[in-house]
Image (cartoon, grey):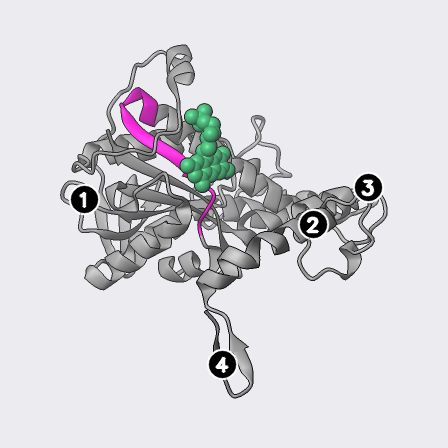
Amino acid sequence: MASEQSGRTELPLQYYLENEYQSLIEIFHWVANLAGSVYTDTTAVVSPEAAYAAAPLSDTHLLSQEFLLNYKHSSLDLTLPLGVGGYFDFPARSSLSLRHLREQEEKAGRGHIVELPPYQNVNASLGVTIRARRSLRTFTGKTMPLRTLSTLLFYANGVTGDIALVSEDNDPQWPTYSLGPTEAAKTRAASSGGGLNPISLYLVVRDVQTLDDGIYVYLPVEHSLKRLATFDDEARNRHLALGVSWGPNLDPATVNVTVYYVYSVYENSRKYGDLGLPFAVVEAGEIAAHLHLISTATKVGSSDIGGWEKVQTERFLGVDGLSRHLVHATVIGML
Ligand SMILES: Cc1cc2nc3c(=O)[nH]c(=O)nc-3n(C[C@H](O)[C@H](O)[C@H](O)COP(=O)(O)O)c2cc1C
């Protein structure tokens, strides 16, 4: 079984798995499940069980718990009121208006733009659709029509209206100058804190009619896609390899569109401070909920995915992981 080299004994992986692994896991579970484990503060890996069991005694928390303990704890914390208060002047209005300009600039800059065809007017009953929605993970791998993708994106996060930016009585306190259109900002299918829309939808496309396989970003104001990369076999395989961590019940090769929700931190934290993160995660969830319902109504399969590798996927998408972060993913496939 074991091979000896220069006084060291090497155990084959199979031997370890068969003889050592199970007992180590048992010790791990025993320690982790001690009520009020004294080991928690000195343990390098804080498992969910250990953090849960030791909560009353320990200084060690899950990172998310640290976050919850420290944000919005009192109205004396001026971060939020100052951020919100400071927002109701020129920079705020220009920031909202700039959204159009930024998208126009995005459109004019590098990268091929694909105008999406008009979305389909979907009349499905909302109650029936909500009852029918299920996470689906078995796809046929058939080609997705471009109009289907247009419909999914429009109902998920497309522009559905305008919001007035000037006060009704033309209050002179409200400045009228702005770097973009002064009267209105665009509103979307899914709601967003302050209308700031910090979530962008990055799409990895495989076999969608007329689109090259590759990476795209959805431009809601223009209802267009900007192509960031076209895939060769190597890039296609790298993305399929990322799909291995999505779990065994899904074949990544059958997914037509993987939707990645990318949060641009300063887009909303400039106004909301630490509240920006929970807002962004809520907003990604709202967009995802729309995506699932419109998928159900148009008989397309969809499922959220929690198993993505953050750093590797961000690198693959060209997202810096500093001011922009991957926060969620949804797969979509033809049934
Ligand atoms: C944040 C989140 C992450 C999820 N991650 C996965 C996943 O990695 N793999 C998967 O097959 N389903 C995943 N799902 C789907 C859930 O398993 C599914 O919603 C749950 O089993 C309930 O089933 P239903 O959506 O059909 O009602 C995820 C759902 C959410 C909201």
Q: Amino acid at mark 2?
A: Leu
Q: Nearer the viewer, residue 234 or 267?
A: 234
Distance from Cα at disc 3 to Cα at disc 2: 21 Å
Horizontally, residue 44 falls left or right of residue 298, namely right
Q: Amino acid at mark 1?
A: Asp
Residue linked to disc 4: 4
Q: Amino acid at mark 3?
A: Ser
Distance from Cα at disc 4 to Cα at disc 3: 62 Å
Residue 305 falls within the magenta-colored stretch: yes
Residue linked to disc 1: 207
Distance from Cα at disc 1 to Cα at disc 2: 40 Å
Task: Kindly indicate whether the residue at mark 2 contacts the one at mark 1 (C-beta within 8 angstroms).
Answer: no
Instruction: Label 2, secondary structure: give it.
Output: loop
Horizontally, residue 170 falls left or right of residue 65, namely left
Name which of mark 1 and mark 3 comes first in the sequence. 3
Name which of mark 2 and mark 4 comes first in the sequence. 4
Residue 30 coordinates in the image, percent (x, y):
71, 47
Q: Residues within 10 Å of mark 3 (few under 14, many from 20)?
A: few
Residue 27 coordinates in the image, percent (x, y):
68, 52
Distance from Cα at disc 4 to Cα at disc 1: 52 Å
Task: Kindly indicate whether the residue at mark 4 contacts the one at mark 2 (C-beta within 8 angstroms).
Answer: no
Residue linked to disc 3: 74
The residue stretch that appears in magenta: 295-308
Q: Which mark is residue 33?
A: none
- Extreme residue toward the bottom, this view: 6
Residue 216 coordinates in the image, percent (x, y):
29, 50
Q: Nearer the viewer, residue 212 or 176?
A: 212
Name which of mark 4 and mark 3 comes first in the sequence. 4
| Disc nearest the viewer among 1 and 3 | 1
Residue at x-position 32% and y-position 27%: 295
Residue 208 coordinates in the image, percent (x, y):
19, 41
